[in-house]
Amino acid sequence: MALFSALNEAVRTGQPYWLTRNRPVVCSYYQELFGLSCTAQHAPYATDLASMFERVEIEAGVDGFVADILLTSSKSGARMLLEIAVTHPCEKAKISSGLPIVEINIQSENAVNRLRDGIDAASSHVLSHNLPGPDAAPHLCATPCPATGLAVLLYENGKAWYSELEIGTQNAEQTLSDPRLSAHEIVDVQFGHQTRPWKTVREHLGVFMIRQAFEQGRPVRSCLICRNNRGRVNDHDIYCVAKTSKVWMSSSGISCTDYDPAGDGDEAWLILRRLGGC
């Protein structure tokens, strides 16, 4: 009755009666550079029920069910059921009907009194069923969420390697501003502090090396695309058939007299597969 009275009064006087829900906030800080948007945050979003509906009924029938309070609009045809849960939650059949329902759990007189000012559907004592989600709110965080990217790097001496960078940090800026770099890309940008498995790193590094060597014509001297590569030994080494020993895969090819690079991109991919994991 407290809720019914508050809604009736709001509709009669033209005063707002707010249903407050959370809606996603979309931060586009990294969108232009990396095509990455953050949707982890939420913000309150208020809808004025008194302006949406002009009729408030108590214990009204709707589609074979009885609503504790039924809101209807003759202009839009919209309907909303407000269900009060004291000892029993809203029945499953009513929820499964598809009718828009706001279920309010009442455990004290304080909870009743709060309904005189509006319904906070963002709180734990209120559930929403079958309500269309509010549109996401665009936002640009002053302090962006932490994000890491895989920087694939090619140096002037032909060395190709990688570094996992936290975007926007001084360490990232120093890595990418190294004057010895001839090319670099940042790929696989993700929120949080990510540690990528070697298979993921190898695949991104492989695409980068093959593009630089066979599309851009830049010199690449990497054991990873050398014909003498016979597979990975550990995290840092591969087995070289020319030297009949393991070599450090990141830079051993730079000054190696046995370096024999792949003739084209297809062959380079075949060599890279020897590292395992494909």
Image: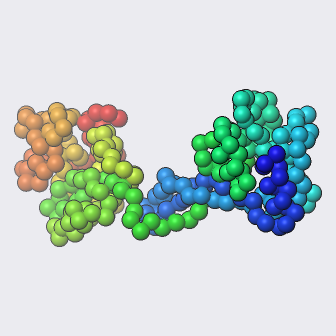
Count of numbered labels shown in the rendering: 0
| Residue displayed at 24% across by 52% down | 162
- The one nearer the camera, 142 or 150, is 142
- The one nearer the camera, 246 or 87, is 87
Image side of residue 163 versus residue 130, left or right: left
User: Within the image, what quadrant is residue 42 found in?
Assistant: bottom right
| Residue displayed at 83% across by 49% down | 4
Quarter of the image that includes the C terminus = top left
| Residue displayed at 28% across by 40% down | 198
In the rendered image of this protein, does residue 91 appear above or below residue 118?
A: above
Quarter of the image that includes the N terminus = top right
* Residue 8 locus on image (x, y percent): 85, 56
- The one nearer the camera, 41 or 109, is 109
* Residue 210 locus on image (x, y percent): 31, 53
- The one nearer the camera, 177 or 231, is 177
User: Within the image, what quadrant is residue 101 found in?
Assistant: top right
| Residue displayed at 20% across by 35% down | 232
* Residue 212 locus on image (x, y percent): 29, 59
Image side of residue 54 versus residue 277, left or right: right
Q: Is residue 62 visible?
A: no
- What is the basis of the colouring in this image? rainbow
In the rendered image of this protein, does residue 188 appear above or below residue 31?
A: above
* Residue 156 locus on image (x, y percent): 17, 64
